[in-house]
């Protein structure tokens, strides 16, 4: 069996979080792999970059989408728990969680469409301010040099 797409990881992951406790993503990754009956060969398959296994990559993408849709929360790095929105979704007993279902949640849809999120915008602002400040300094230096007399007459 080949490693399923990241959307196939979403429902098993959310179901594992249904207990309401905080879980480490690293631990959940192994549990969800067993839920999906992934073989050792499937788990060992490496991405072309050679930096990560294919199943870990897809698992983490699924977790990112669930966080962006606010179905799960991440109180700290590598830790997740189900949110009230996630509990409501599980109460509806979905057969599958995919991008179409996540499109019902506005936060998720802006992420899927590739729109910039507010965190990235806030990080970009200091860089922009530095660029403007440096440009202003350069312009000020040039104007000061031009306004100084070439020789003084005393």
Image (cartoon, rainbow, N blue to C red):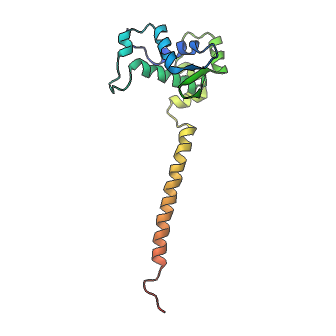
Do we see residue 2 in this rendering? no
Q: Residue at x 65, y 11 (%)?
A: 91
7 relative to 50 in the view: left or right: right
In the image, farthest residue toward the bottom: 154
Q: Residue at x 42, y 9 (%)?
A: 38
In the rendered view, tell whether residue 41 sits above or below residue 24: above
In the rendered view, tell whether residue 140 sits above or below residue 5: below
Q: Nearer the viewer, residue 60 or 101?
A: 60
Do we see residue 113 in this rendering? yes
Q: Position of residue 154 (x, y in %)?
A: 49, 92
Q: Position of residue 82 (x, y in %)?
A: 62, 19
Q: Position of residue 7 (x, y in %)?
A: 49, 17
Q: Nearer the viewer, residue 117 or 53?
A: 53
Quarter occupied by residue 97: top right
In the rendered view, tell whether residue 36 sits above or below residue 145: above
Q: Residue at x 49, y 20 (%)?
A: 26
69 relative to 2 in the view: left or right: right
Q: Nearer the viewer, residue 55 or 102?
A: 55
Quarter occupied by residue 51: top left
Q: Quadrant of the N terminus?
A: top left
Q: Position of residue 40 (x, y in %)?
A: 37, 10
Q: Nearer the viewer, residue 92 or 9?
A: 9
In the rendered view, tell whether residue 88 sits above or below residue 37: below
């Amino acid at each position: 069996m080949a490693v399923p797409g990241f959307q196939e990881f979403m429902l098993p992951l959310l179901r594992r979080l249904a207990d309401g406790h905080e879980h480490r993503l690293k631990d959940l990754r192994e549990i969800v792999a067993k839920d999906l009956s992934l073989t050792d060969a499937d788990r060992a398959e490496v991405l072309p970059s050679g930096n990560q296994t294919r199943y870990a990559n897809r698992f983490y993408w699924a977790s990112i989408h669930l966080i962006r849709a606010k179905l799960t929360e991440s109180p700290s790095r590598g830790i997740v728990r189900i949110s009230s929105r996630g509990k409501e979704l599980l109460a509806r007993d979905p057969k599958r969680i995919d991008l179409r279902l996540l499109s019902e949640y506005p936060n998720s849809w802006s992420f899927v469409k590739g729109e910039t999120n507010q965190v990235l915008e806030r990080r970009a602002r200091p860089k922009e301010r530095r660029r403007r400040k440096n440009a202003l300094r350069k312009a000020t230096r040039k104007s000061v040099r031009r306004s100084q007399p070439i020789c003084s007459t005393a």
